[in-house]
Amino acid sequence: MKHLLRTFKLAMATMALTLGGLTLAAGATPAAHAAFRVINPTIKTSVFYFGSPEGATLDVQGSGFTPGGSVLVEEFNSAGRLVNSRSVTASPFCTFTGVIILCNGGGAFSAGFEFDPLPPTTQTYYYIAYDYGSHRWSNWSNQSVS
């Protein structure tokens, strides 16, 4: 009987430690997945025209950045001169929507650059983004605004 009781206590203690460890590991899962994610920063641009007199918003969309990390987006004119820059935060690995937790991998952002009024002639602008988390630059993307 003593042996049976001791075996039962040992089994219960092992089960409690195992479940406790799994509970702690589950909380670390998003960070662990993010650590093994391949960071491949990529951007693309699009322009939206509005109003009278007409203005425009040039939107830079990024993906593949470090989830929840800081990103520097830079705008250059056709002469290669830096004319604008801004810092944004890439989406986190998981987000809480009030009821459920969504884990989509994160690493996306959107940054708008305003042209109001429009330039007098068609101008081409060039964009690039720097991912502080991975220390990597994205591709270049260009867009004409007229």
Image (cartoon, grey):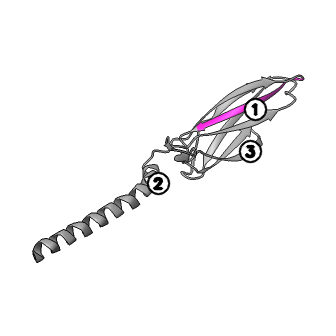
Where residue 138 appears, x then y in whole percent? Answer: 58, 40
Classify residue 125 by image quadrant.
top right
> Judging from the image, what secondary structure is the residue with disc 1 in?
loop
Where residue 127 appears, x then y in whole percent? Answer: 68, 36
User: In whole angstroms, how far apart are the C-alphas of marks 3 and 1?
Assistant: 15 Å
User: In whole angstroms, how far apart are the C-alphas of marks 3 and 2?
Assistant: 29 Å
Asked whether the beta carbons under mark 3 and mark 1 sit within 8 Å of each other, the answer is no
**Which part of the image, by quadrant, shows the C terminus?**
top right
Circle 2 is placed at which residue position?
A: 31
Q: In the rendered structure, find residue 85 and report the number of the disc placed on it.
A: 3
> In this rendering, is residue 71 above or below 121?
below
> In this rendering, is residue 16 above or below 128?
below
User: In whole angstroms, how far apart are the C-alphas of marks 1 and 2?
Assistant: 40 Å
Residue plotted at (60% across, 38% down):
62
Q: Residues within 10 Å of mark 2 (few under 14, many from 20)?
A: few
Q: Amino acid at mark 1?
A: Ser
Viewer-proximal residue, 66 or 125?
66
Viewer-proximal residue, 79 or 73?
73
Mainly helix, strand or loop, the magenta region? strand
Q: Amino acid at mark 3?
A: Ser
| Closer to viewer: mark 3 or mark 1 | 3
Classify residue 28 by image quadrant.
bottom left
Q: Amino acid at mark 2?
A: Ala
The residue segment tinted magenta is 53-62
Circle 1 is placed at which residue position?
A: 78
| Closer to viewer: mark 1 or mark 2 | 2
Q: Residues within 10 Å of mark 1 (few under 14, many from 20)?
A: few
